[in-house]
Image (cartoon, grey):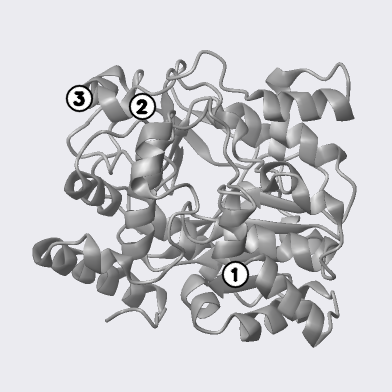
Amino acid sequence: MSKQLASGHEVVPMSEEWMAEKPETRQLFNKGMVRIMPEGWLYPSTATFFLDKLQHFKFRPDDVVVVTHPKTGTTWTQEILWTMLHNPNLINPDANETLLLRSPDISQDMLHDGKAIPDMRPELFTNKLDKLCPGRNHEDGVLLQIAEVMQGPRVIKSHYPITLFPPNFLDITKVVYVARNPKDTVVSFYHFCRVIKVFNYQGSFESFVEEFMNDGYTAVKVLTATTPHRTVQFCHLPRKPPWLKKHSGGIQSPRDVPGSVLLGPYWPHLADAWRRRDHPNLLIVFYEDLQADIMAELHKINKFIGTNLTQKQLENVAKQAAFPSMKSRGEPLYKEYFNTEVLEKSGGYIRKGVSGDWKNHLSPELNQKMDQWIQKHTAELGLTFKWSN
C-alpha cells in the first residue's frame, strides 16, 4: 500500500516479486525498497522516515548545500566549498579531519539498513554524534543530526533531489548542483557500486549500464499538486508510465519497472535542478567545466557564495582540491563500508578524476545506445553539454 510523504510525494513499496527477480541488486535492505513517485527514485524503505524528518530540518542562510546525482563530482565540490569557506589560507587544522565529517551527507542515513553489514552506522559517525550531542538516538539519523548541530557556515551534501527538500529550501539556502555527463557518471557509479558493501553489485558493466538507462523517464513536464499542507511542483512524466501497476503489495510488474540502480534515475534528478536554474540561490556547476578551467569556475563559485577570496586564496583552493592532493591526504574511507579488495583493484574511492574515461569502457554498441538515450533527453531538457562527442 502506498503512502504520501510530508513533501507530497507518493511512496510505492516494491513488491516481493520485483525484489525476487534480481535478489543480488534488489534485496539489499532489511526493510525492502520503495519508489518515490512520480519521478520514480529508488530508495531503501527507511528513506521515507528520513525524508519526512528532512522537511523539518532547519537550514540556515549561511549554509551551502551540494546536491548531486551520485558520482558526478560531489566529493571534489565539497572539498572546494569547505576550503573556500574555512581554509582559504591553508592553515586550518580542521582540514585534517575526514571530509565525511566536515561535510556530512544527510542522504546517507537511509542506507544504514543494509543487509551486507549488521550495523551500518560506522563508529566514525556515531562517535562524532555522541561527542557533539551525548544521548542522541542514532535511529533518528546520525548524519542528519551531526549536520543539525554543526557550527556554520555548513557545507552539507545530499543525493536527494531538490524537490524532496522543504518548499522554502532555495529561498533560505545556497545550493550548488553538480552535473556530469551520463557516460562518465555511469562508469564511475559502476565502480562505486562494486566497492560499497551496501550496493554489493557483482553483475557485468553492460548490465549496469542497461539498468542505468532503463529509467522509464520519457519527458519533462512540471505538474502542480496540492496537499492539505502545501502546494508542490513535480518534474513529472507526461502520462502514467506503463510500469506503474500497483496493488496492495506494491509495484507489481517487475519486467516493465525502470532499472534497479539504487538512487536513480539520472534524468529526473538533473531535470529537477535544471528547471530551477534561474533561481538566484542555485548555481549549476558542470564537472567538465571544472576539469577544463577550474580557476574560472572557482571565480563563479566565489561570487555565488560571497566569500570574496583573493586570487592567491583561490589558487590555494585549487591546490587543496586537486585530485593528487586529495588522494595524498587520505581518502574518506571506513573499512566497515568498503570492499577493500575490489577497491584496490578499481583505483580507490577517489578513482581517476578525469573526463572521457567512458571511452575505455563502453563498447561501440553500448555507446551508440547511450548516445541515442542522451540525445533524446537533452533535447527534451533544452540542455547542451560540451562532452556530447
Q: Quadrant of residue 82?
A: bottom right
The three-letter code of the residue at mark 3 reads Glu
Residue type at mark 2: give it.
Answer: Met
The C terminus lies in quadrant: bottom left
Residue 176 x, y percent position in the rendering: 65, 65
Q: How far separated are the C-alphas under marks 3 and 2?
A: 12 Å
Q: Is residue 242 above or below residue 280?
A: above
Label 2 or label 1, whichever comes before in sequence order = 2
Element at badge 1? Answer: loop
Identify the mark nearer the N-term, 1 or 3: 3
Viewer-nearest of discs 3 and 2: 3
198 relative to 207 in the view: left or right: right
Residue bearing the label numbered 2: 14
Name the quadrant containing residue 37.
Answer: top left
Question: What residue is disc 1 on?
Answer: 276
Q: Is residue 203 left or right of residue 52?
A: left
- Per the image, label 2 sits on a secondary structure element best described as loop
> At which x and y percent is residue 260?
31, 38
Q: Are marks 1 and 3 in contact (CB under 8 Å)?
A: no
Give how far across and how far down residue 388 sits, in percent. 31, 79
Mark carried by residue 320 = none
The residue labelled by disc 3 is 21
Residue name at image x 87 percent, y 38 percent? 149
Quarter of the N terminus within the rendering: top left
Vertical order, 247 against 357 (above or below): above
